[in-house]
Image (cartoon, rainbow, N blue to C red):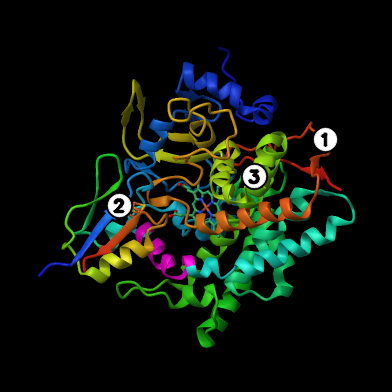
Amino acid sequence: MGNRIRVYVDKNKCIGSTTCIYYAAQTFTLDSEGKSTVVNVDGNDSNKIQEAADSCPINAITIVKDE
Amino acid sequence: MPLIEDLLDKEVVNNPYPYFHQLRKEDPIYWNERWNGWVFTRYHDISKILIDNRFTAERIRPSKNMPEQMVLDMASTYEILSKWMVFNDPPNHTRIRMLVNKAFTPKAVEEMRPFMHEITDYLLHHVQSKGKMDVISDYAFLLPILVISKMLGLPDEDRDLLKQWSDDLLLLVFGAVKETNRHERAKNGLQQMVYYLEDVIQARHKNPQNDLITALVTAKEKGDVLSMGEVISTCTLLIFGGHETTTNLIANGLYSLLKNPAQLEKLRANPSLIHSAIEELIRYEGPSKAIMRIAKEDVEIADKEIKKGQRVLLMQNIANRDPEVFEYPDKLDITRQSNHHLGFGKGIHYCLGAPLARLESTIAINQVLKHLKNIQLERTDLEWQPNIISRALKQLPVIFD
Ligand code: HEM
Ligand code: SF4
């Protein structure tokens, strides 16, 4: 069963630090402009994804938990 | 246009924008013979290079024409600087940055808020009755060093020492070229700081405290920890990296507001604009003028061929006024939206201290507006430091009621 969450990266804010990819490499990847995108919300354990969001230097990642 | 080869030409230093606007138009990727490298001035070029791994951040090395004895003397300094994450590429960079991330958290920054109020209250109270101050030496220079010492957990009585050592090393890192003895002073300052930090770190190993040094010593990530050398080196980076830069953000920011009284009044009337105002002050007259990188291989950009081993100078402040990206780039507008300035860099080296710098400058500027009535520039013929990578006023004398 997958993570019951949705993950968004605010591309307007992302400065491409790659921190999220370090924590959750199967979930985030850099696009051609050097900004993070979500490739798979089930790519990593949900607390790894949480750690990625918490570590983003400009708070560009939002996690929404499904009820 | 007659290109000015000397990047430290007095007129260019005092008023860089007209010259660089024209350079951006006429030769946006410009080989500067005298600096011996490429000068970039367009936002999009700079933005791309900062995320391009064909350029290395490993740039700490003795200069080519340094006498051999001096290279040997300086070896210990370069040893410390070479461990600064900002001068490392992945995988070393990733390792150190992610470990330091564990310690230097938003929470640790936020906890400093009351202390920042306390210090700024104290400093302003001190000058209030005099009716004048030099914003830099009486105010902006003191706050960052006091805050970072407190965060690290260094005893109050040692702050003056740290300030002295920090000044000494800034000579080397920020390259005030004409200063004599600059290597000597940098070396001594750094060496003394290293001995000092070694003792503190050892004490925290034995006896953990609730401070940043303890957090650095105990940070673990994927089974890995920072070595003693890395903790020392990171402490020196946090002290130096955040000192002159934050001082200059506060000073340049106040200067820009004082030169644009309508904007200053707008901010007084709407204190909630402070966040967009800080971003705009960084864009408009940010403390970091340029970032340097070195090409690891031949790279073609636009019609220029950057050769392996050549240096590139990425002019952040000029990119931040690129009309391709910013409307009315030379206008200070504290309500500017979508302000994607490059003042803190971009990509993997994006300033780790940005949250701290933002909070310190927010409080410092708010406090000045709150406590000092009718603040004005005492003179307008101010001079800027002749320096390639930092944008720093020599003095900022102001008067108030
Ligand atoms: C307004 C103040 C500041 C400005 C304008 C600024 C600017 C920058 C810039 C442009 C970089 C990127 C350098 C590069 O790409 O080569 C950087 C990196 C860094 N800054 Fe800041 N900085 C400021 C304040 C601070 C503070 C307060 C601290 C910490 C106490 C700090 C710590 C760092 C560190 C550790 C790095 C290296 C990050 C890395 O390599 O991954 N900075 N800063
Ligand atoms: S951590 Fe944040 S800034 Fe860095 S790449 Fe991910 S989303 Fe972008």
Give the labeled residue for mark 3.
B267
Query: Magenta region: which residues?
Result: B93-106
Name the subunit of mark 3: B
Q: Position of residue A1 (x, y in %)?
A: 9, 70
Work out whether residue B259 or residue B334 is closer to the camera in this orientation and state it: B334
Q: In whole angstroms, how far apart are the C-alphas of marks 2 and 3?
A: 31 Å
The reply to whether the residue tagged 2 has its Cβ within 8 angstroms of ligand 2 is yes
Q: Position of residue B343 (x, y in %)?
A: 51, 43
User: In the image as oriented, which residue stretches furthest toward the right?
Assistant: B130
Q: Secondary structure at mark 3?
A: helix
Q: Does label 3 lie on the same chain as label 1?
A: yes
Residue at image coords 16%, 57%: A40
Dot 1 crowding, Cα within 10 Å, few <14, some 14–19, many 20+: few
Name the subunit of mark 1: B
Q: In whole angstroms, how far apart are the C-alphas of marks 1 and 3?
A: 23 Å
Could you tell me the amino acid type at mark 3?
Leu
Q: Secondary structure at mark 1?
A: loop
Give the labeled residue for mark 1.
B379
Name the subunit of mark 2: A
Please give left or right for residue A62 compared with residue B263 in the image. Answer: left
Task: In the rendered view, tell whether residue B384 sits above or below residue B344.
Answer: above
Give the labeled residue for mark 2.
A9
Please give left or right for residue B133 compared with residue B15 in the image. Answer: right
Q: Position of residue B87 (x, y in %)?
A: 45, 52
